[in-house]
Image (cartoon, rainbow, N blue to C red):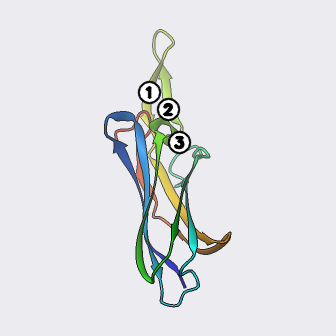
Amino acid sequence: MTTILDPELTVEMVDGHPGRRRLVVVYRLEVPVGDAVLGCDVHEEAIVKAHDEHDAPIRPLAVQFRLEGDTMIEHAGIHHRRLVSEVHRFLLDVEQDWWDTDQAGGTEPIAEFADHLAATISIQVDDRTIATADTPILTGSWGALGSD
């Protein structure tokens, strides 16, 4: 049975583009000898969503990023996989920011809540899901007020 091992989600800066972030999902796909997936085209999908840690007075926004790929499994063993997507950093403000108004009525940032993201990976052959796994929750501050 094909298995997803060591799933991990990271958010990286994009050199030369301070307003962009790269979402990266990596994992190892273990395919045993004689598995029916051998010789098949495989569709990979990772859905990155905000995760509610119940650590703020509001719920996280309903953000969702889809990272996809396709590959052919030609041999048994471990296959190192990587799915990537670039997004604007303000889309990663998965929890609302606190703002105040200044003397002139403009807004001033007070604080940004910590953001929590996780990805669910699914592997499909002929529209049939053969393996799923969740990455650990990634906590950081990548949005407009974030310091990465």
Task: Kindly identify the residue that appears in the image at 35 percent across and 43 percent down.
Answer: 13
Q: Are marks 1 and 2 in contact (CB under 8 Å)?
A: yes
Mark 1 Cα within 10 Å, few/some/many (few <14, many 20+)?
A: few
Which residue is under mark 2?
Answer: 98
The amino acid type, in three-letter code, at marker 1 is Pro
Question: Residue at horizontal 58%, vertical 46%?
Answer: 63
- Where does the image place residue 113, in percent across and percent down from the top left? 46, 42
Task: Please state which of residues 79 and 90 is positioned toward the viewer in this rendering.
Answer: 79
- Image location of residue 65, percent across then percent down: 56, 50
* As drawn, 121 above or below 20: below
Q: Quadrant of residue 58?
A: top right
How many numbered marks have been drawn onto this rendered protein structure? 3
Q: Which residue is mark 3?
A: 95
The answer to whether residue 63 shows anywhere in this view is yes
Task: Give me the residue at 41% from left, 47% from top.
Answer: 22
The residue that label 1 is drawn on is 109
Q: Are marks 3 and 1 in contact (CB under 8 Å)?
A: no
Seen from this angle, which residue lies furthest top? 104
Q: Nearer the viewer, mark 3 or mark 2?
A: 3
Q: Percent position (x, y) of residue 81?
A: 43, 66
Under circle 3, the secondary element is loop
Q: In the figure, 108 relative to 39: above or below?
A: above
Looking at the rendered image, the quarter that the C terminus falls into is top left
How far from the left and from the top, in percent, is residue 69?
53, 60
Query: On screen, 145 above or below 34?
Result: above
Residue at far bottom of view: 34
Q: CA distance from mark 3 to mark 1?
A: 14 Å
User: Along the polypeptide, which appears first: circle 1 or circle 2?
Assistant: 2
Q: Amino acid at mark 3?
A: Glu
Mark 1 to mark 2 CA distance (whole Å): 6 Å
